[in-house]
Amino acid sequence: MKTDLIEKAYAVAKERYAAIGVDTDEAIALLEKQQISLHCWQADDVVGFERNDALSGGIQTTGNYPGRARNIDEVRKDIEFVKTLIAGNHRLNLHEIYGDFGGKFVDRDQCGVEHFQSWIDWAKANNMKLDFNSTSFSHPKSGSLSLSNPDQAIRDFWIEHTKRCRRIADAMGKAQGDPCIMNIWVHDGSKDVPVQRKKYRELLADSLDQIMAEKLDGVKNCFEAKLFGIGLESYTVGSHDFYTAYCATRKQMYTLDTGHYEQTENVSDFVSTLLMYVPELMLHVSRPVRWDSDHVTIMNDQTLDLFKELVRSDALDRAHVGLDYFDASINRIGAYIVGTRATQKCILQALLEPKALLREYEDNGQYFERLALMEEAKSMPFGAVFDYFNMKNNVPVGEEYMACVQQYEKDVTSKR
Ligand SMILES: C[C@H](O)[C@H](O)[C@@H](O)C(=O)CO
Ligand SMILES: [Mn+2]
């Protein structure tokens, strides 16, 4: 795209936004600083390198598009390429099953920092920071209950796994000089109506307390709530109310996955309350279609509202942004770019809202003016600002990245 055209459009946009009290340069600077944690599992349909087995644990990928990354080198190569098409400096979010196991089988209660040293080195060489996740799914001991399992041996197995994951995350955090955000999501639940709901929740809380007892400075933990999993529709041990209470009482970070709510709920409604009682939020930006389908994130109302709510609450810096979707039906590299750019667009739209003026109208009871300005803000020339942001950061502008993805497919993924 022509540089002078982008600059001209930006100059006009800058003036339009300035007229409603918004500084576009400041918004761009904030967006440049905003790291997004790219989820490694979009590259290979959440298979990992442990047992190359089918996905279980209430989640599912659908589709069979060719070119899935089949090993650690291919995942790394794909992420390195993705980075070239996105402005800013982002993070990589790893699951435990993506360890460098050197072709050997390493069970979940045996994993250690040594299996992630090559990731730590790779991240350093690629100027990326790492985040981490324990993995309770896709294992013979996963069943429908892991950390809340009344069978002591199974529960201890998963406690040991998660403790080890915290130590791995701690090493990552210390090596990168920035805390590694470690997410704990367990699929635990029940297909049919249980009669001992409280019992499983007590077990889960006890397991988590045991896991969190070790003091580790390099890791910040977050806890992900969910509505239900496939095959576990009647009861979820780690529900929203469970983790809200757990995180509030333990002063821990809450993970808000945009796919984990009732379809008619607006996820952004949860933000302000959570911000009052938990220290920080981890966001799993996703797109549910009829259920927690993990479609590629797009710039839709739910995602826009989420970031608007954070910016309106002056709390964008209390949220860690990560992606969580896995679409195996389209070009997986393209899926990364579409979802990451859509997330950036939503953050930018939120940063470009005339917040000060809107607050003033609300405080004065000028509700017509508040509504009118919110409506007008929707059709302000935000696209010109986003184009300029990409040009300034030397990545393709607009649809230009499509050709790059197609070329990578021709040269790399189609040959797998
Ligand atoms: C693979 C991820 O950990 C998983 O998607 C989890 O974050 C989730 O959202 C489960 O529904
Ligand atoms: Mn998630």
Image (cartoon, rainbow, N blue to C red):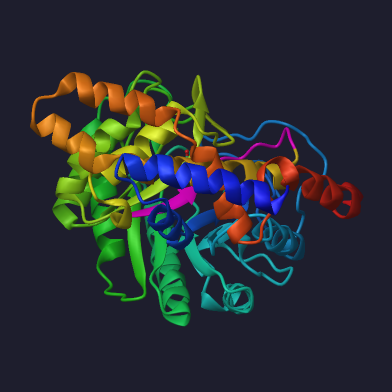
Q: Taking 76 as reference, is 16 above or below it? A: above
Left or right placement of residue 255 versus residue 43 in this view: left
Q: What residue do we see at 48% from left, 29% from top?
A: 300
Left or right placement of residue 164 versus residue 92 in this view: left
Residue 174, picture quadrant: bottom left
Query: Residue 113 versus residue 404: which sits nearer the camera?
Result: 404
Query: Residue 138 versus residue 313: which sits nearer the camera?
Result: 313
Residue 161, picture quadrant: bottom left
Q: Residue 63 location in percent, x, y? A: 72, 31
Q: Taking 76 as reference, is 238 above or below it? A: above
Q: Residue 110 location in percent, x, y? A: 53, 69
- In magenta, the rendered stretch is 319-330
Q: What residue do we see at 51% from left, 67% from top?
A: 130
Residue 211, picture quadrant: bottom left
Q: Taking 160 as reference, is 121 above or below it? A: below
Q: Does the magenta run of residues contain 209?
A: no
The answer to whether residue 215 is visible is yes
How many marks the image carries: the answer is 0
Q: Residue 319 location in percent, x, y? A: 33, 53
The answer to whether residue 137 is visible is no
Q: Taking 120 as reference, is 31 above or below it? A: above
Q: Does the magenta run of residues contain 324?
A: yes
Query: Residue 416 versus residue 48: which sits nearer the camera?
Result: 416
Q: Residue 141 location in percent, x, y? A: 51, 48
Q: Residue furthest left?
A: 364
